[in-house]
Amino acid sequence: MARKFREKKLVVASHNPGKVREISELLKPFGVEVYSSGELKLTEPEETGSTFLENAELKARSAARESGLVALADDSGLVVPALGGIPGIHSARYAERPDTGKRDFSWGMNKLHRELEEKQIEKRSAHFSCALSLAWPPCKEFPEGHVETFEGRVYGTLVWPVRGDQGFGYDPMFEADGYHQTFGEMDPGEKHDISHRADAFRKLIKACFEQ
């Protein structure tokens, strides 16, 4: 039986404004006061996990310990099986430009497209994966804290050229199965309904939130 979330405040353990905005939208119906790690100036822990689940738990536990609030962390990324699973857990790092050291997803999408072209990969199936971890800070009952983690996916195909300026990250080059728009073209509300994050979020809500 999963632990229920009954608090009024929650910190989203991310410094990514797009991700914080998306998670805050999903939490709106529950009347939760949402803060971000950036707002609270929390430390960004080194992501040393080898899976999305491990990294989500690591970030959630760190934010919960440091803030004293329940923390929700997301670790997500794009997985391209034909390229051995890259960029995977390194999706953000993959988009870092060597000349500036800053993340530039337009540059990252071009880089991914070049790799697919160079390897002459025609079957460009891919999926977005998202692990969501809800962590409670240490207390008398749970000296090490407590965490609940859920994973969601959405399957689709990579397209080129990229289309749309909605969303963030690799959204403009990803077309979900059964749709003719990329995540970059979709209305945010429609994307929220079918995304990997929404899939993980539904599982989290069902297990941990009072309906």
Image: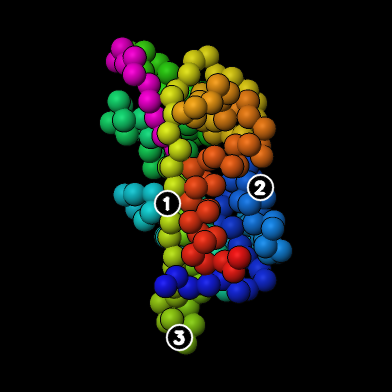
> Percent x, y for residue 45?
46, 57
| Disc nearer the start of the sequence (3/1) | 3
Mark 1 neighbour class, 10 Å CA radius: few under 14, some 14 to 19, many 20 or more: many
Q: Compared with residue 109, is residue 87 higher up or lower down, i.e. above or below?
A: below
Depth check: give the residue in front, 147 or 112: 147
Quadrant (top left/top right/bottom left/bottom right) for the N terminus = bottom left
Q: Secondary structure at mark 3?
A: loop
| Disc nearer the start of the sequence (3/2) | 2
Report whether residue 48 is seen.
no
Mark 2 neighbour class, 10 Å CA radius: few under 14, some 14 to 19, many 20 or more: some
Toward the bottom, the furthest residue is 140
Please report contact status of discs 2 and 1: CB closer than 8 Å, yes or no.
no
| Disc nearer the start of the sequence (2/1) | 2
Q: Amino acid at mark 3?
A: Glu
The residue under the point 53% across, 40% down is 195
The residue under the point 34% across, 49% down is 51
Q: Quadrant of residue 84?
A: top left
Q: In the image, is residue 123 part of the stretch drawn in magenta?
A: yes
* Extent of the magenta region: 119-128
Mark 3 to mark 2: distance in Å?
A: 32 Å
Depth check: give the residue in front, 22 or 179: 179
The numbered mark at residue 201 is none
* Residue at numbered disc 2: 21
Q: Quadrant of residue 36?
A: bottom right
Q: Amino acid at mark 1?
A: Glu
Q: Amino acid at mark 2?
A: Arg
* Residue at numbered disc 1: 151
Mark 3 to mark 1: distance in Å?
A: 26 Å
The residue under the point 45% across, 75% down is 145
The numbered mark at residue 141 is 3
> Percent x, y for residue 133?
47, 59
